[in-house]
Image (cartoon, rainbow, N blue to C red):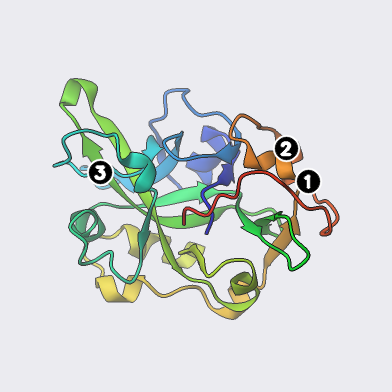
């Protein structure tokens, strides 16, 4: 999976979709070009036991880290090692979250040269939920809520775009992912091929390669032969 995704739904829409309390305090806005360390929505379980829509910074900072400076390198956790990694194991065991997304981007190098960005998104326009883990870093008066997205080996046609993809959670798995008592090994299975077949692999223009660009035009379909010289983002 690449280092960019889109999340554009309002806090009201997300809180309704995920049946969660809205704790974003007006801090959410549409983002068609999410990059590492950006603030974006996530859904987690509060200490009181209810789902909460929060704003977190993309790039997990473990509570024991001296500084948050390495967050951009912690945007994703591999499903194969998340349960044993020093940086991620604690969060995976006790602090799992859902990361709402419209879709994600990836870059491909065709044989004829250049780079072609693609946008993976549901054909029906429904919301995606990436499997995530979260942590809080720093003193209470200046704490940071941070998170990582889990990735797994790409399957089906998605493997033709990149060898990794986000761990996608169908709606029926949202509750079990958030439940701290769920058996961890059962949580790391990707959706079945039939579910993944609902995703469109859409060629898009080169503008998404610049983090300064935003807007719905970034996700618009272009001819697949249109190659990009923009920076390739393959952080996942």
| Residue furthest top in the image | 141
Q: Tell me the number on the disc at residue 220.
A: 1
Which mark is first along the chain, 2 or 3? 3
Residue 106's image quarter?
A: bottom right
Q: Would residue 25 be found to the left or right of residue 198 on screen?
A: left
Position of residue 130 measured from the top left corner of the image (x, y, whole percent): 47, 56
Residue at left offset 36%, top offset 64%: 78
Q: Residues within 10 Å of mark 2 (few under 14, many from 20)?
A: few
- Give the x, y percent position of residue 18: 47, 48
Q: Nearer the viewer, residue 108 or 185?
A: 108
Q: Is residue 83 visible?
A: yes
Q: Which residue is mark 2?
A: 216
Q: Give me the C-alpha separation between circle 1 and circle 2.
A: 7 Å
* Between 163 and 103, the one nearer to me in the picture: 163
Residue 53 in sight from this viewpoint: no
Instruction: Please give the residue where the numbered disc 3 appears in the rendered image.
Output: 135
Assess whether mark 2 and mark 1 are in contact (beta carbons under 8 angstroms). Answer: yes
């Amino acid at each position: 999976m690449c280092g960019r995704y889109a999340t554009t739904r309002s806090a009201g829409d997300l809180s309704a979709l995920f049946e969660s309390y809205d704790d974003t305090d007006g801090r959410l806005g549409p983002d068609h070009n999410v990059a590492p360390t950006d603030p974006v929505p996530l859904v987690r379980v509060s200490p009181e036991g209810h789902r909460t829509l929060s704003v977190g910074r993309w790039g997990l900072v473990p509570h024991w880290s001296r500084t948050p400076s390495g967050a951009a390198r912690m945007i994703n956790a591999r499903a194969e090692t998340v349960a044993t990694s020093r940086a991620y194991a604690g969060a995976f065991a006790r602090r799992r979250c859902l990361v709402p997304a419209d879709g994600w981007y990836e870059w491909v190098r065709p044989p004829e040269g250049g780079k072609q960005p693609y946008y993976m998104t549901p054909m029906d326009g429904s919301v995606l939920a990436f499997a995530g883990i979260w942590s809080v870093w720093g003193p209470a008066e200046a704490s940071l809520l941070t998170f990582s997205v889990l990735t797994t080996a790409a399957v089906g046609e998605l493997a033709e775009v990149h060898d990794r993809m986000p761990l996608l959670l169908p709606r029926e798995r949202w509750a079990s992912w958030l439940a701290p008592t769920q058996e961890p090994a059962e949580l790391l299975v990707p959706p079945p091929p039939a579910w993944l077949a609902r995703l469109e692999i859409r060629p898009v223009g080169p503008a998404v390669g610049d983090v300064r660009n935003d807007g719905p035009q970034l996700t618009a379909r272009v001819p697949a032969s249109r190659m990009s010289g923009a920076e390739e983002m393959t952080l996942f």
